Image (spheres, rainbow, N blue to C red):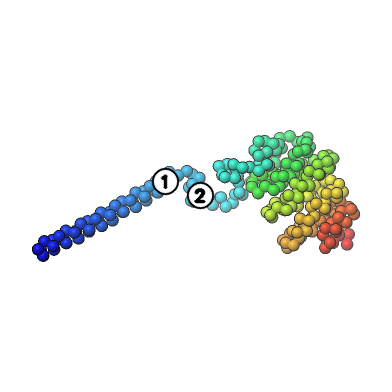
Amino acid sequence: MQKSECHGGVQLRNRVTDDHDERTSLSAQVKHRTTVQQSKSLSTSSPESARQLYPRPSDKLNPKTINPFGEQSRVPSAFAAVYSKGGIPCRLVHGSVKHRLQWDCPPENLPFDPLLITLAEGLRETKHPYTFVSKEGFRELLLVAGAPEKAVPLLPRLIPVLKAALVHLDDDVFERGLNALVQLSGVVGPSLNDHLKHLLTSLSKRLRDKKFKEPITSALQKLEQHGGSGSLLIIKSKIPTYCSIRC
């Protein structure tokens, strides 16, 4: 009887050992197949996936560019939509040192309405090439002969757009809006005074940031210079600490 029980115990232990060895072998096979499948997946993945896993050094040097297959391209901004449809009559020419715009026709032959307003709306863009096209297009359009006569009637519609750039949280957007405001004041002169108070509140708030104190002060001085004595009263009413260029 004892021999039978002993023999039965040995057989039970053998079966347990065999089951454990079988499970261990099966687990090893599964892990091997998973590793092989992952390896094949990496080797057959798209170039885009490979670039994500192993970014190229040149990616760090290039500005952020719109990815046509990215999520953000599904809901383009108003400016991006107009630009994509050819609504901006110029194209970006990439240079080895700097970029430039090539207009489809001489800018002086283009109507400012609604092109100048559309370019001003593009100042709020944060992606390349929209940032460059809007900033440079706005600047070049204001340089053409007859720009004052074309720009002054658009001021009631331009000011809210520039204000939106000046209150933007992105520092680069704010700086583009500030530069555009100075450029506009140099073209329209005292005609800007009636609208100036709508823009000074945002400039006053940004003055609290030390890094913007110098560029904003310089901008205010140019606004005073272009707007005359009437602009000084408006600036002082919103920014009492401003020191006139005549001091």
Quarter of the image where one finds residue 133: top right
- Residue 59 is left or right of residue 91, and the answer is left
Question: Farthest front residue?
Answer: 1
Residue drawn 56% across the image and 50% down it: 59
**Quadrant location, the N terminus:** bottom left
* Few, some or many residues within 10 Å of mark 1 (<14, 14–19, 20+): few
Q: Return the x and y of residue 132 as percentages of the image width and height.
A: 68, 46
Quarter of the image where one finds residue 143: top right
Can you identify the residue that label 1 sits on?
41
Question: Farthest right residue?
Answer: 229
Q: Return the x and y of residue 217 as percentages of the image width and height.
A: 79, 59
- Looking at the image, can residue 149 be seen? yes
**Residue type of the residue flagged with mark 2:** Gln
Q: Return the x and y of residue 17 as percentages of the image width and height.
A: 22, 59
**Quadrant location, the C terminus:** bottom right
- Looking at the image, can residue 145 be seen? no
- Residue 40 is left or right of residue 100, and the answer is left
Can you identify the residue that label 2 sits on?
52
Q: Which element type, helix, strand or loop, lies under badge 2?
A: helix
Residue drawn 59% across the image and 41% down it: 74
**Residue type of the residue flagged with mark 1:** Ser
Q: Which element type, helix, strand or loop, lies under badge 1?
A: helix
Pointers 1 and 2 in contact (C-beta within 8 Å)? no
Residue nearest the viewer, comparing 145 with 152: 152
Residue nearest the viewer, comparing 131 with 1: 1
